[in-house]
Image (tube, rainbow, N blue to C red):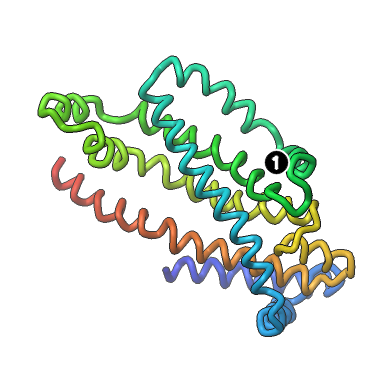
């Protein structure tokens, strides 16, 4: 916690240094940006934009993560399915997010499901790869022991498969969550939506750097909050599990 705070303070100092070197027309000061962010919140502009962007990013992330985990487990268990899905996932992962944004805008319209769909398509291959790797790297002796003792499939999934998946899945989920906010905002910027991305596009058109940075700061703050609420419990669970595993070993 302390070192994390030191990292953020260092980032703020670097921001202030950049402001003093390049001037306000290139990089507004942190104080000015925070003041603008407070104005956006108190004036009621931040709330509706946050609701739209949060719904797009989190819905796409949750559905994409669930789909990626399910497909990754299935591909790891059924070898022919894994062989069929690997090249598809590689191709999907190789398509730039901006291309998915353009296609989604054509398919769903600027104010439709384009941001959420783009997030979903970005998240699925990231989580799929981690889930597949976790399944392939699992301990076969534990699975064999569970079968010998007649453990039902759902119990084996909950007690054996999922715990072994958490180690490779956690960094993938964190990466996918960061991409969810980035891609969601990018889709809104290009589509001119009513979320944070649309507000950034408007601020950019007005050449208001302080407001632009304020919206960006809001996105980063929301990412940190979501990471703490959604992923920190998994980190604590893994941290509590490792000493027990070491002691058992």
Q: Residues within 10 Å of mark 1 (few under 14, many from 20)?
A: many
Residue under the point 35% across and 39% down: 165
Q: Nearer the viewer, residue 16 or 207?
A: 207
**For residue 81, above or below residue 238:** above
Image coordinates of residue 189 in percent, x first then y, are 77, 56
Image coordinates of residue 167 in percent, x first then y, are 36, 43
Instruction: Judge left or right: residue 107 versus residue 132.
Output: right
Instruction: Judge left or right: residue 116 versus residue 24.
Output: left
Residue under the point 31% across and 40% down: 162
- Element at badge 1? helix
Q: Residue furthest right?
A: 206
Image coordinates of residue 212 in percent, x first then y, are 77, 68
Q: Nearer the viewer, residue 122 or 111?
A: 111
Residue under the point 88% across and 69% down: 207
Residue under the point 44% across and 31% down: 72
Instruction: Judge left or right: residue 236 versus residue 42.
Output: left
**For residue 151, above or below residue 30:** above
For the C terminus, the quadrant is top left
The count of marks equals 1
Residue at numbered disc 1: 97
For the N terminus, the quadrant is bottom left
Q: Residue furthest top?
A: 80
- Quarter of the figure with residue 211: bottom right
Q: Nearer the viewer, residue 231 or 159?
A: 159
Image coordinates of residue 135 in percent, x first then y, are 36, 30
């Amino acid at each position: 916690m302390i070192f994390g705070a030191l990292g953020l303070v260092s980032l703020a100092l670097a921001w202030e240094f950049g402001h003093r070197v390049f001037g306000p027309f290139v990089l507004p000061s942190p104080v000015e940006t925070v003041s603008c962010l407070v104005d956006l919140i108190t004036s009621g502009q931040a709330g509706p934009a946050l609701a739209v962007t949060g719904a797009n990013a989190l819905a796409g992330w949750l559905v994409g993560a669930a789909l990626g985990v399910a497909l990754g487990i299935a591909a790891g268990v059924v070898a022919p399915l894994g062989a069929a899905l690997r090249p598809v996932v590689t191709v999907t992962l190789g398509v730039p997010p901006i291309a998915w944004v353009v296609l989604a805008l054509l398919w769903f319209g600027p104010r439709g499901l384009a941001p959420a769909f783009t997030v979903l398509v970005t998240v699925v291959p990231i989580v799929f790869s981690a889930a597949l790797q976790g399944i392939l790297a699992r301990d076969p002796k534990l699975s064999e022991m569970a079968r010998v003792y007649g453990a039902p499939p759902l119990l084996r999934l909950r007690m054996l498969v999922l715990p072994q998946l958490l180690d490779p899945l956690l960094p993938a989920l964190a990466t996918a969550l960061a991409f969810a906010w980035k891609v969601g905002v990018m889709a809104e910027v290009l589509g001119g939506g009513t979320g944070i991305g649309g507000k950034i596009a408007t601020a950019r058109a007005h050449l208001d750097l302080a407001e632009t940075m304020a919206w960006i700061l809001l996105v980063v703050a929301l990412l940190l909050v979501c990471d703490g609420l959604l992923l920190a419990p998994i980190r604590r669970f893994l941290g509590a599990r490792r000493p027990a595993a070491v002691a058992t070993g």
